[in-house]
Amino acid sequence: MSRIGKHPVIVPKGVTATVEGNTVHVKGPKGELERTLHPDLTVSLKDGQIVVERPSDESNHKALHGLSRTLVANMIEGVTKGFRKELELIGVGYKADQRPYGLQLALGFSHPVKYEAPKGIKLSAPQPTSIVIEGANKEVVGQVAAELRSLRPPEPYKGKGIKYVGEQIRRKAGKAGKVGAK
């Protein structure tokens, strides 16, 4: 049996969960999420716990078992605590301004870059050189962080760009210069 999949997901107080077929709907203080799981798996709600079961020990069923259980656990965690990613802007003149639609970024281009926040995501810029992404859906929070980083990924020579907080950028040496020229 899957080591992750066999554990039930406990539904905490303040969270309502409903299971209809293979669709799990979770509602909590940070929002509400819904996900339809693979049709081969059976999902049930018993005694305040969501249990995911697989039909056989085939390798694809084993993989789906652990994945589905983790997806449900992430939904529960998202509506109770929420998820958060932090980005850092490094470079002269690089800054982020919070706007009603999302963020306006100055990233060294000839024009400002506008980024609109998707539904359920809260973007904030507590300082001009930092961005905080918060939301209930872990996948969407990660996707928004990746999209923002891709606007100006960190470059290896000076380290300028948008990076995750705590990310290490591998630096390269610049030009070596002329050696042995006549």
Image (cartoon, rainbow, N blue to C red):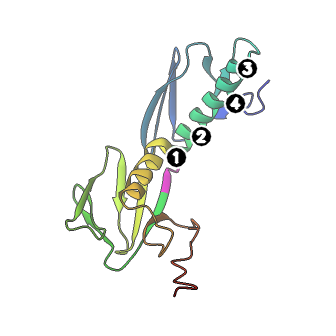
Question: Which one is closest to the eye, mark 1 or mark 3?
Answer: 3
Alpha-carbon span between mark 1 and mark 2: 8 Å
- Which dot marks residue 80? 1
Residue at mark 3? 59
Mark 1: which amino acid? Thr
**Of 111 and 123, which appears nearest the observer?**
111
Residues tagged 1 and 2 counted as in contact (Cβ below 8 A): yes
Q: Position of residue 155 (x, y in %)?
A: 46, 67
Q: Residue furthest left?
A: 111
Tell me if residue 132 is in the magenta stretch.
Answer: no
Residues tagged 1 and 4 counted as in contact (Cβ below 8 A): no
Q: Is residue 131 above or below residue 1?
A: below
Which is nearer the N-term, disc 1 or disc 4? 4
Residue at mark 4? 8
Label 1 sits on a secondary structure element that is helix
Quarter of the view holding residue 112: bottom left
| Residue name at image x 52 percent, y 77 percent | 174
Q: Residue furthest front?
A: 182
Question: Which one is closest to the eye, mark 2 or mark 4?
Answer: 4
Q: Position of residue 121 (x, y in %)?
A: 36, 49
